[in-house]
Image (cartoon, rainbow, N blue to C red):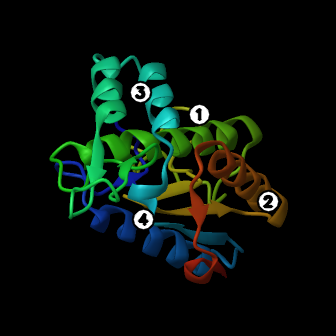
Amino acid sequence: MLEPGQGGGMQGRSVNINMQRMRFVTHEAHRRGKRVYRVDINFRNAFNAMSQAALWHIMNMFHIPDVDLLEQTYDSATVRLAPKDAESATITFDTGVAQGSITSLQRFNIFIIALLRMLTATGQNQEISHGLQIGKDQYDSSQDADHGYEFNNIGFIDDISIFAETPEGMQTLLDMVQEFTVWCGMEINVIKNFLAHN
């Protein structure tokens, strides 16, 4: 269930790992005189904005048990603000995960891992990555037999960074992120996004 690019929110997988990867790509690109494009993406109010229907769909696709129980729990949850009289409305939610719940972070991780896997699969199918062709002697969990240490995304719980060696490759990845956000109802916080290239 773990995605190599996701750091944070999982035991033994802190965001420090991804910061090291980011520094490594930047250093190697500079050392080799190669251009690497990176876009940092911040999702606006991510934990509250994601579609619950999309979350249940993703959890079912990953064959996670008892999704129907979670769905029923969320479907029947309501909030009513004080005073609880005839003029007070009952509010239901169809987005987000319960704040403060011990499992909310794990559910959000499952959700964002679906996006990271889509980006990874697209990168492998269309050869979109940072493009530095780092040798197999520097083995890491993001490495596979065909692609060495190449990757096109890293996650920081609710923020992601995507990498490509060409503007066209970057556009392909951005289009995929756009498609995912339209499907699940999340919005990109444009003010906090960042494009960098070496």
**Distance in Å between CA atoms under marks 4 and 1:** 19 Å
Vertical comparison of 28 with 85: above or below: below
Q: Earlier in the sequence, mark 1 or mark 2?
A: 1
Tag 3 and tag 2, C-beta contact below 8 Å: no
Tag 1 and tag 3, C-beta contact below 8 Å: no
**Distance in Å between CA atoms under marks 4 and 3:** 28 Å
Q: Amino acid at mark 2?
A: Gln
Q: Earlier in the sequence, mark 2 or mark 4?
A: 4
Q: Earlier in the sequence, mark 3 or mark 2?
A: 3
Vertical comparison of 32 with 3: above or below: below
Along the viewing direction, whichever of 74 and 151 lies nearer the viewer: 74
Q: Amino acid at mark 1?
A: Asp
Circle 4 residues within 10 Å: few <14, some 14–19, many ≥20: some
Tag 2 and tag 4, C-beta contact below 8 Å: no
Vertical comparison of 33 with 121: above or below: below
Circle 2 residues within 10 Å: few <14, some 14–19, many ≥20: few
On the image, numbered disc 1 is attached to which residue? 146
Q: Foreground mark, 4 or 3? A: 3
On the image, numbered disc 3 is attached to which residue? 59
Residue in view at x 36 percent, y 32 percent: 75
Q: Earlier in the sequence, mark 4 or mark 3?
A: 4
User: How many circles with numbers are drawn on the protein?
Assistant: 4
